[in-house]
Image: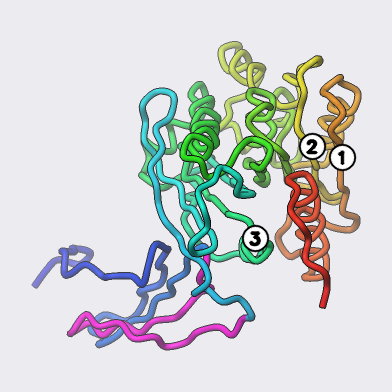
Amino acid sequence: MRPFGASRFERELALPGIGTATGFGGRSGAAETFYSYTSLVTPADIYRLDLASGRSTLFKRPRTAFDPARYETRRAFVTSRDGTRFPIFIAQRRGAPRDADQPVLLTGYGGFNVPTTPSFNISAATWLEMGGTWVAASIRGGGEYGRAWHEAGTLLKKQNVFDDFIAAAEWLQAERITRPQRLAITGGSNGGLLVGAVVNQRPELFGAAVPAVGVMDMLRFHRFTIGWAWASDYGTADDPAQFRVLRAYSPLHNLQAGRRYPPILVTTADHDDRVVPAHSFKYAATLQATDTGPAPKLIRIDSDAGHGAGKPTAKVIAERSDMLAFVAHALGVAVPARP
């Protein structure tokens, strides 16, 4: 008998495609278990796994108007500035041409040990239905490859996160999937910081940017609400060495007059008690007061809403609709008419 907690390899489970599987719970000695499978183009399907044979069968599939068969997901590996390789996941219409003209929405997070894996979300599905390509980047700072991967994107090494995301944008253009005028980026919370930082560092790479509820003031974030708890990833300006690194990439403090920035839509909510809206207020005001070219620099402030969790469906739909409409207009994508 194996000791309690011991494990051994039994078999490899083949998934339906490039996606993410979760679940596999159950009682010891059970003959079956269940898991969900999702991808950038697949809503969460539930499978039954027979533990004796290793055979999986579809148990439940959600009903949606979205047809996954029209789209495909592929994985590619990108090499960052320091030689580190990381995966990106690309979803697009089957047979889409490689003509450097695909409208692409690139997203990432890169922090707090949170993995970015391919999973279904309504924004991606809607963007695909609009004719776009959706790309998710699994950059350092997340939890995709364990503790070392996470720590390689924290504290004094935070620039690795931005280098990875920039490398993903450069790869998409080098592979003739898109070009700067047709590439938009978006991310929320720590992902909003990511978007703000890379737009400052390489504004010429992007045709639009949407930093959502982002941490934009890296010198004072730890002084508001739960911000002190983020010092494990960011450090704080109270430490001289960490101050220098934070100052070097802080979105608020690195807006550069005289450089042409792409269209930017900042989003926040007036009751966000996690990343207080002052981050977005200060960033948007400074962005609008700085000479960054004629492209629009806007802010969308949701009322009676917070950081995102628990937001009513109607507000989520309105927010995502505004974001996608802004990106579509900036990239020259026709917005489908309502039926």
Q: 97 or 191, which is in the foreground?
A: 97
Crowd band around label 3 with a 10 angstrom C-alpha radius: few (<14), some (14–19), many (20+): some
In this rendering, which labeled residue sits more in front, label 1 or label 2?
2
Verify CB contact (< 8 Å) between mark 1 and mark 2.
yes
Tell which circle, 1 or 3, labels the residue nearer the N-terminal end: 3
Displayed quadrant of residue 184: top right
Density class for disc 1 (Cα within 10 Å; few <14, some 14-19, many ≥20) is: some
Dot 1 corresponds to which residue? Answer: 298
Give the residue type at disc 1: Leu
Q: Nearer the viewer, residue 115 or 198?
A: 198
**Rendered residue at 80%/55% (across/down):** 325
Q: Position of residue 183 (x, y in %)?
A: 64, 42
Closer to us: 113 or 201? 201
Nearer mark to the viewer, of 1 and 3:
3
Q: Which residue is mark 3?
A: 131
Q: Which mark is residue 263?
A: 2
Mark 2 is surrounded, within 10 Å at the Cα level, by few (under 14), some (14 to 19) or many (20 or more) other residues, namely many
Label 2 amino acid?
Pro
Q: Does residue 48 show up magenta in the picture? A: yes
Q: Which residues are magenta?
A: 41-64
Cα distance between the residues tagged 3 and 2: 20 Å
